[in-house]
Amino acid sequence: MQPTRRSFPQLFADARRWFEEGLLAAMEAAGATPVSPTQAQLFAVLDDHGTTVSELARRMGVTRQTAHQAVHGLVDAGLLAQVPDPGSARRRLIRRTPDGERAHRQATAILQQLEDRLAERIGREGVDALRAALEASWGESTAPPPSAPPR
């Protein structure tokens, strides 16, 4: 019996988990403030000038409530701050604090080390090809055309 071929979403999830686990373990070993995978993801999608909770939730693909909880945990840890949005009196932006900026720089360096480790394992050409494929425009996501039913 031939093994079931894993789908791209499963493969992407495994790859993301590999980087996430490596990042969180290295940050913990370096004595950084512990964060959850959701908080790490939030940190990764945060703009340098600040981002609203609603936009963070959209980028992460989670509910606004989940993003809000992650933000508050990071605010409590001293890594993020909520500031008024200069463009709207009703909105608040989420920004990194100075400690959050240091953690972000540290995480960026660790992620580069993980990418280098991946290149040692699968080859630099493989990593470069993977990056090129992921950075290419994939166009709009649409439903595939219906296939003929199996006979």
Image (cartoon, rainbow, N blue to C red):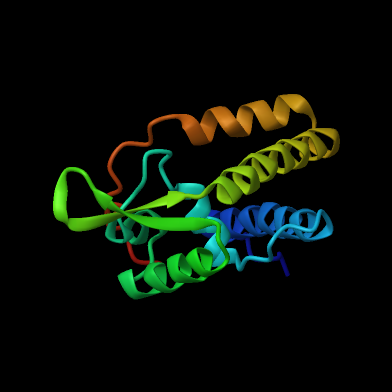
| Displayed quadrant of residue 86 | top left
144 to 138, vertically: above or below: below
Q: Is residue 151 visible?
A: no
Q: Is residue 109 left or right of residue 47?
A: right
Q: Quadrant of the N terminus?
A: bottom right
The image position of residue 72, as x and y in percent, is 45, 70
Q: Is residue 132 left or right of residue 52?
A: right
The number of discs equals 0
123 to 9, vertically: above or below: above
At 38% from the left and 36% from the top, the residue drawn is 138
At 68% from the left and 66% from the top, the residue drawn is 34
Q: Nearer the viewer, residue 109 or 102?
A: 102
Q: Is residue 16 visible?
A: yes
The image position of residue 41, as x and y in percent, is 52, 57
| Displayed quadrant of residue 127 | top right
Q: Nearer the viewer, residue 68 or 82?
A: 82
Q: Nearer the viewer, residue 12 or 52?
A: 52
Q: Is residue 108 left or right of residue 42?
A: right
At 34% from the left and 71% from the top, the residue drawn is 63
Q: Quadrant of the C terminus?
A: bottom left
At 56% from the left and 45% from the top, the residue drawn is 98
The image position of residue 22, as x and y in percent, is 75, 54
The image position of residue 44, as x and y in percent, is 52, 49
Q: Is residue 116 left or right of residue 17?
A: right
